[in-house]
Amino acid sequence: MSDNNTNPEMRSNFIHDIIDEELASGKRTTVATRFPPEPNGYLHIGHAKSICLNFGTALKYGGTCNLRYDDTNPVKEDTEYVDAIEEDVKWLGFQWDKRLWASDYFDQMYEAALELIRKGKAFVCNLSPEEIKEYRGTLTEPGKNSPYRDRSVEENLKLFQDMKDGKYKDGEAVLRAKIDMASPNINMRDPVIYRVSHTPHHNTGDKWCIYPMYDFAHPIEDAIEGITHSICTLEFEDHRPLYDWVLREVGFWPNPPRQIEFARLNITDMLMSKRYLKRMVDEGYVDGWDDPRMPTIAGIRRRGYTPEAIRNFCEEIGVAKANSTVDAAQLEAAVRDDLQNKVPARNVVTDPIKVIITNYPEGRKEMVTVENNRNVPEMGERQVPFGRELWIDGDDFMEVPVKKYFRLFPGNEVRFKGAYFIKCNEVVKNDDGTIKELHCTYDPETAGGGVNANRKVKGTIHFVEADSAVKIRIREYGHMMKTDEDGNMEFNEDSVRETWGYAEPSVAEAQPGERFQFFRKGYYIADSKLTTDDEKVFNSIVSLKSSWKK
């Protein structure tokens, strides 16, 4: 059910407390969960929480977890989404016990509907969708019975057969549960459990022109599969009485599943709706479902987030009974914490400024040694070239320095990491007043970055040797959405900014999906789609510093 990197030891939560009580009492002897996505879009990070909870719970109790597609609505489904869902689950580190389809149970659902009709618990209704809505009532006023509610069992059986035989057009007839039109819970006011839809189904073809509604299908699917705990998000809490009613009134399963709701994941400035995310794709706001700005699992994977970071984040925020919103900085902190001990550093400069070491011999090149990850000595060291002409980062020079600026400026000396102490002597400018190059000198007695020098400098900067520099494209990402003055979310037009820089020569070998820390800048990943042998394109993952305080 999981790969070797997945920790089955989840932190206990209120759902596990319920499971513990049921196992201790003997009500349950096993634990079986399921992850039941509808294949009508790509999964987002909110689904990642559900995946981790369902699969992780099964792992913790030595049980099973199925991947079951809720494909009861043939209009919305697409095999592209099925493939994406399975890739996402595997990427997060889990493997399902069985891959199932709700449509596999259409025959059993039909039999369950017949059972309700025979018991006088369901009837065929010919009200229009608008009339059904009108008859339903409001939160403060009870509904009123359909004029077709008191049809006989025999008539309902015949009419339901007519629905199945295609004698009705879409919307002309539905099968409704007969419960209570005065119930304070609107979901219990004779809900529709079957509708007519003359749409071919990807799995069953033209066999059916009637399809079950989700609230009727889902409990039956769970029961058929032997699911013990149907874990779902909080918006289904009001649907739980209907879930229990279906299983109780159909009566085919002596020890039915138990539905338990938990708070869904909400993150600041993140859009958590497949419907709205699909709109962002369809209307061209983003470059597909895996655009690195998207909160889809495909998007954050391309952005460079790791599955370990997502699992750790889901574990850290816990499982709650009440909805709340998590700061996006907490997610970024989880990603940063995971990357800092596994990603090697590379020298990259942006907004580059040319440096000429005037007293360094022309034509001479040497290799200097720098560590791959200062937090992890075991990751070893690498050598980078040093020569007379270098590039430094635009942020590392100020012609007129501000207070407490310890990097390079005229007359100041800094450490070039792993190389020498360098002093800026002259700023050479172009005709338009922009900086052409800096003329500097080096102290040959400070080889290795002046570790053993008899004097100290306050600033350390990195560099890229000019002749061997690799030009790369860099895409800096912000949040795709932002909150306006009224608290509404809107698309952030400044959510991506493309720039370029020079990198040390080893970056020329970067493969798609390879991650690096750009020294003193942040964490980056070679884009999985755009990086080629000839051009390296990097996406920003997270910055080096966090605004999140635990």
Image (tube, grey):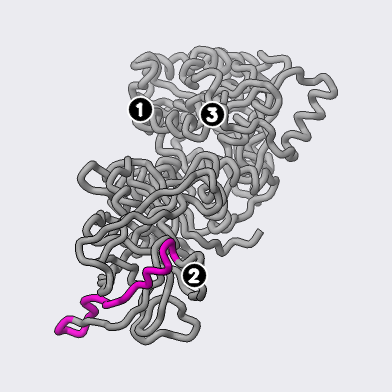
Residue 530 can be seen in this image:
yes
**Labelled disc at residue 79:** 1
> Dot 3 surroundings within 10 Å: few (below 14), some, or many (20 or more)?
many
Instruction: Identify which residue, 484 or 474, lies in the foreground.
Output: 474
Label 2 to label 3: alpha-carbon separation = 53 Å
Residue under the image location 51 percent in, 38 percent down: 132
Amino acid type indicated by mark 3: Phe
Q: What is the magenta range?
A: 430-449
Q: Residues within 10 Å of mark 1 (few under 14, many from 20)?
A: few
C-beta proximity under 8 Å, tags 2 and 1: no
Residue 156 shows in this picture: no
Give the amino acid type for the residue marked by disc 1 in the picture.
Answer: Thr
Contact, mark 2 vs mark 3 (Cβ under 8 Å) = no
Residue 548 within the magenta-colored segment of the rendering: no
Provide the residue designation for mark 2. Answer: 453
Tell me the tag on residue 94.
3
Name the residue rendered at 64%, 29% in the picture.
230
Spot the residue most to the right.
Answer: 25
Q: Secondary structure at mark 3?
A: loop
Q: Identify the disc placed on residue 286.
A: none
For numbered disc 2, what is the local secondary structure?
loop
Give the residue at x 58% y 16%: 112
The image quadrant where one finds the N terminus is: top right
Q: Is residue 479 above or below residue 246?
A: below
Image-based side of 154 in relation to 415, left or right = right
